Image (tube, grey):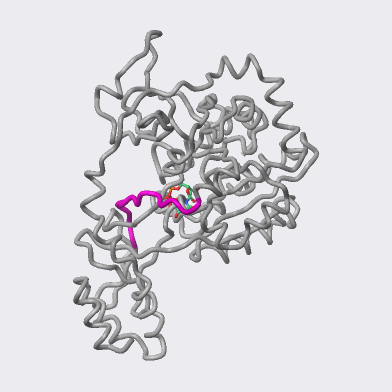
């Protein structure tokens, strides 16, 4: 594509400012920018105003498995989960492609050291956590780590340097998720440099399609995997490949399961697992009416109380069935570093634009059923999202110490 063809394309989409960057980039680098522009899904940019009015269906509460119910059947669930793991049917996927913009870390979030008297890396806590299960099951769980092009090299180098915190290298596989362009609040494409758009990871919803693109489906089948536990990088207390969760999901004949915590109060800002038009679904806190948030059942408990913590279990055959179904795109306000027209690289301190993301929580609605599996918040939920205040390193440290961790 030559300059005048590019100019026509950009004008058509109201993005002529890109030409200024193109003209400043070295001739040899221009092809990179042109190919990024040719690959843009222009439909995305039109979503900026639409998502806010996205229609949802009819919500109803979904009964879950309470802590009391789980405790009453702990042994059979545990045994079934351990057997499933020992039989080699469980894999784990660590979602580590995010950029941690709220935390403001420069590199991969998993590399953050939260120790006080010694090194305690987030990746280390997660891997040690899986290893506690592999010891009990006497079998390794294939661990897939999704990164993005922005943090892949650093993640691999770090884990290699740390000798994978004792996890056998042959059971760890990295793969890279897709990227999408980001725009400012006016919908103008942001630039990373004169020869590159500002590209961001396309959300955690693409974890399975990116796995398939990376040719890992054969690998999953080669391992005879039936269940995949997907989890976030930033909840340092969660139990990964939890045998009781696996056993309970299988015993309840569910195609998927979600670890949930009981909502602390009606206004807690957490997505809630419920039913939408008769199928499992997650409703975001800002999508709930006051009436819904405050609704109570006959026992006086909140009807919509299953707060999700980004730890899901999916049956592989069902994931394959839904592979080609598009997930909704979320338009998310973020802090996006960018290059100004006069060549300054800005790292904004507050959100300055939108990223376009698919989210793993939307996958739930594609399953016929999903088990809300309740866990004790204080024992399994210590997310590190923000630099200070709620869900920060200091709140996570406190929770880890209350759970007997030595930091
Ligand atoms: P978050 O929604 O917290 O996003 O991710 P983030 O990018 O890490 O952080 P902020 O919003 O910029 O502060 C939840 C989980 O999903 C992963 C993250 O790594 C984290 O484990 N994730 C998120 C991806 O793997 N890819 C993405 O594109 C986004």
Return the x and y of residue 371 as percentages of the image width and height.
52, 28
Name the quarter where the C terminus is drawn.
top right
Return the x and y of residue 212 as percentages of the image width and height.
57, 58
Residue 332, magenta (yes or no): yes
- Residue 247 shown left or right of residue 57 in the figure: right
Question: With respect to residue 268, does 341 lie above or below?
Answer: below
Residue 373: name its quadrant.
top right
Residue 274: name its quadrant.
top left
Q: Chief secondary structure of the magenta span?
A: loop
Please name whichever residue, 180 or 114, is drawn nearer the observer in this view of the structure. Answer: 180
Question: With respect to residue 153, does 386 lie above or below?
Answer: above
- Residue 327 shown left or right of residue 375 in the figure: left
- Residue 244 shown left or right of residue 260 in the figure: right
Please name whichever residue, 60 or 299, is drawn nearer the observer in this view of the structure. Answer: 60
Residue farthest toward the top in the current orientation of the protein: 299
Please name whichever residue, 382 or 139, is drawn nearer the observer in this view of the structure. Answer: 139
Q: Number of labelled discs?
A: 0
| Residue under the point 70% across and 31% down | 81
Please name whichever residue, 299 or 212, is drawn nearer the observer in this view of the structure. Answer: 212
Residue farthest toward the right in the current orientation of the protein: 138
Residue 173, magenta (yes or no): no
Return the x and y of residue 256 as percentages of the image width and height.
54, 35
Name the quarter where the N terminus is drawn.
bottom left
Residue farthest toward the front in the current orientation of the protein: 321
Magenta extent = 323-336
Return the x and y of residue 162 as percentages of the image width and height.
69, 56
| Residue under the point 46% across and 45% down | 360
- Residue 226 shown left or right of residue 3 in the figure: right
């Amino acid at each position: 594509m030559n300059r005048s063809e590019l100019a026509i394309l950009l004008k058509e989409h109201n993005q002529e400012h890109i030409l200024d960057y193109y003209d400043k980039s070295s001739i040899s680098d221009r092809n990179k920018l042109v190919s990024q522009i040719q690959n843009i899904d222009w439909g995305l940019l039109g979503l900026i105003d639409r998502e806010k009015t996205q229609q949802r269906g009819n919500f109803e509460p979904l009964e879950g498995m309470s802590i009391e119910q789980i405790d009453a059947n702990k042994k059979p669930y545990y045994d079934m989960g351990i057997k499933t793991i020992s039989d080699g049917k469980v894999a784990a996927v660590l979602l580590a492609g995010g950029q941690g913009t709220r935390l403001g870390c420069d590199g991969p979030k998993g590399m953050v050291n939260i120790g006080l008297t010694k090194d305690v890396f987030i990746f280390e806590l997660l891997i040690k956590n899986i290893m506690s299960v592999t010891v009990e099951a006497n079998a390794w769980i294939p661990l897939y780590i999704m990164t993005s092009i922005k943090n892949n090299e650093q993640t691999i180098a770090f884990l290699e340097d740390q000798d994978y915190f004792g996890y056998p290298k042959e059971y760890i596989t990295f793969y890279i998720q897709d990227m999408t362009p980001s725009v400012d609040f006016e919908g103008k494409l942001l630039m990373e440099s004169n020869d590159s758009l500002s590209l961001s990871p396309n959300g955690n919803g693409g974890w399975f399609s990116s796995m398939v693109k990376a040719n890992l489906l054969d690998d999953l089948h080669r391992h005879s995997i039936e269940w995949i536990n997907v989890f976030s990088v930033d909840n340092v207390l969660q139990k990964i490949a939890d045998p009781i969760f696996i056993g309970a999901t299988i015993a309840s004949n569910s195609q998927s399961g979600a670890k949930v915590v009981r909502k602390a109060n009606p206004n807690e800002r957490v997505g809630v697992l419920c039913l939408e038009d008769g199928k499992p679904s997650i409703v975001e806190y800002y999508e709930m009416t006051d009436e819904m948030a405050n609704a109570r059942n006959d026992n006086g408990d909140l009807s919509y109380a299953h707060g999700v913590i980004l730890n899901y279990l999916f049956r592989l055959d069902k994931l394959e069935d839904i592979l080609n179904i598009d997930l909704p795109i979320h338009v998310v306000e973020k802090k996006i570093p960018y290059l100004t027209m006069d060549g300054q690289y800005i790292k904004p301190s507050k959100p300055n634009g939108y990223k376009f993301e698919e989210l793993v929580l939307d996958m739930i609605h594609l399953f016929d059923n999903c088990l809300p599996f309740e866990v004790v918040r204080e024992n399994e939920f210590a997310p590190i999202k923000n630099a200070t205040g709620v869900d920060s390193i200091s709140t996570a440290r406190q929770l880890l110490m209350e759970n007997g961790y030595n930091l």
